[in-house]
Amino acid sequence: MLLYPEDLFEKLEFDKIIAQTQKHCKGQRARDILAKPRIFNQLERVNRMLDEVQEVKTMSSLGKPLSIRPYYNIDQPLFWLKKIDSVLEIESIIQIYDYVWAIYELDKEFKVPSARVNYPSIHEILLQVNFDITLIKAYQKIFNEENEIKDDASPELKLISKQIKSMERELNRSFEKQMTAFANMGYLKDSKETLRNGRRVLSVSSEHKRKIKGIIHDESATGRTVYIEPEEILYLNNNLFELEAQRRHEIRKIIKEFCNKLRPFCEEFDMWQKIIVRLDIINAKAKMASKYNGNKPELTDEIGLDLKQAYHPYLVLLHQEQDKKVIPFSVKLDKEERILVISGPNAGGKSVTMKAVGLMCLMLQSGMLIPISPDSKFGLFSHILVDIGDQQSMEDDLSTYSSRLKNMQMFLQKAGKKSLFLIDEFGSGTDPALGGAIAEAILLELKNKKCLGVITTHYSNIKMYAYENKELLNGAMEFNKEKLAPTYRLAVGKPGSSFAYEIARGVGLPDRVLKNAQKNAGIGAKELDELLNELQEEKRVYEKRLAENELEKLQLQKLINSYQTAFGDLEFKRKKLKMEKKEIKLNELNSAKAELDQMIKELKKEKRLEELEKKVEKIKVQKQEVVENITELKEEIYYNDDFDPATLKVGDFVKMRTGGETGEILSIAKKKAKISMGFMQVDVALRDLVPAKTPIELRSKSVNMETKANPLQLESKLDIRGYMPSDAIDTVQEFVDNALMSNLSTLKIVHGKGTGVLRKVILKKLKEYKDIKSITHPKDEFGGMGVTYVEF
């Protein structure tokens, strides 16, 4: 990642954003890390960082802010804790436990299933935490809620604490007795008592100091008051001091044992510190985003920017304090239009807009949300090059213009396809004619390097160059001529005017001065700006009309396609309905023929066959006509195309003409193909297959179908009443094979009860299929033994 120059953060005011963000940090370590922000250009990493901030911002908006306590750097305490038999100060232990408590609470909050769904990025950060609850129990055994050592932290400490309290009560009684006695004698000052060297002493008037036996600890500055510890209290005080020494010794022993328990967790403590610091930084960024309404745009691998309703982040913060309105802008840079040339009046917002683009790139690539519409798009840059402000250097003997040329040299050396360059007042600092010519030549080189950029300029030749080149586009900061004030609005697609004469007239320059200025500037100076605007406006109008024509053409084509599809579907449904009616009639004829065959058997004995045979013959003719009609309809519905099945070969992906899943051809023989679909193989006539796209993933799908789902899918019901056993077997086999190809889950075969012959041969055939899970019959009211259900 190349950032140029070294003071890039200051030039784009990123340092001010960082300073504001640091104020929201709870710990100094997070503030130190933010002080040296890192800019990343890895798409996955930046996406993850932005997701983390977005999730915490969402939590805060829902009234559930991320709870981060103030914390301290515990590197030094951990350094000493790692040493065997080391004993930490109680303050250091409390600092370590600030992290333990914080991690404990976060672990409980984000390890629940709902957190994994709602806040996956934060959940993932805390996945590395393997919290040991014994840490909490061990601490609570020793420390109370005020982080003080409990009197019963150990049996020995409990005994010593009890003795100290008893001694303090006795000491108080004795001292009160002595003080009352000496006060009645008039030996004491009004204050009566005080503390000296950690002991209670009497405030005795200097003239009575020899009347009270004891130890003089101190005297007042005037010498009028002497502080004496009475002799009778001395022994009790010495005993109390000895007990307190024992207490300190016992506490040290307890802390040492406690440190020994904490020592194995040093690595975890260090990791937890890093997690808390990371969450602190994320939380600070989220709070900043809430202040300027930051959002996450769509990040893309393609280089480009599509900024919609974008605001300068620092300007938003600044104007919030001053209750001022900030004007948004929209900019799109891509492979077709790479460089935006912004022109317009001074103090009109050119530089602010340009800086905003660079600042948002820095913020985004450092993991900060930006004030922009969420449907904006951002490509990540590997080089951000900036030339803003006066960079003259007395040390390097560089003038302003020389320093700018040095920057341009760096740009030309380093810029590439993933570079963003920003140049303020392009070409200025020298003779306008020469400066403009050099600027135009540099712009050509940068354009050829395919990098993206935003520049500001007043030079007409640069505006004209942007108009003449497809990869450049003009942009103007609008100006209100009536109010003689800038509007701060960016109008992309047309060049801007400097409005120098209008501004000069507005500030009160005499007309004669302006007329002489216009005369000196030449007739064509202002006209060139106007001509450019007219040309750019005409170009914009024609481009808009062209886009509208293309849109209308696309919409018209969609309507034509929709009409053709609707007409085709309607024709298909009409023919399919006609075919289904014919099939129903065929079933009725098959049933009638079966009944007549039965009657023939019964009437053979009575020798009255002539009239029945005529009826049978008539039904046969009708049946043949229906079969032919059905065949013709099937040809029209399923085979009405120019596809030649002979072109199919092994390895092709195909599907049934009647619909279903995609399968792969394993072999071809005798105009039949063996098709592999998942874990099963079926044989299908080549004529019944059509090519299919290679599937992304072949996997079994179970679809419950009691009726047909659409005209191209296989029905789950078959009626074979009246069929001969041999015909029934062939029909059932084809029906089951097609059902497997179409991934139906259940089938219904209606065969009638009769003598049970059809049911038996069908059952025998079905048992040949390993894919069948069960074969059952419904209750009598639903067909009983005359219907067979098949479940795969």
Image (spheres, grey):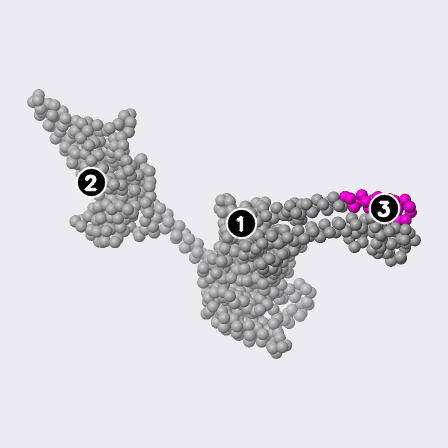
Q: Which residue is found at the position 50% from the left and 51% from the top?
A: 127
> Where does residue 565 sit, x and y in percent of width and height?
33, 45
Residue 601 falls within the magenta-colored stretch: no
Q: Which stretch is magenta?
A: 169-192
Would you say residue 773 is visible in this rendering?
yes
Q: Give percent across and percent down for residue 562.
A: 35, 46
Picture quadrant where residue 740 is located: top left
Q: Residue at x 25, y 30 (%)?
A: 787
| Left or right, residue 303 beside residue 760 | right
Q: Which residue is mark 2?
A: 631
Question: Measuring 10% from the left and 23% from the top, which residue is drawn there?
Answer: 603
The image shows residue 430, relative to residue 373, as above or below, that is below
The amino acid pointed to by label 3 is Met
Q: Which mark is residue 179?
A: 3
Crowd tier of the residue under label 1, counting other residues whose Cα lies within 10 Å: few below 14, some 14–19, many 20 or above: some
Taking the spot 54% from the left edge, 59% from the top edge, the residue there is 366
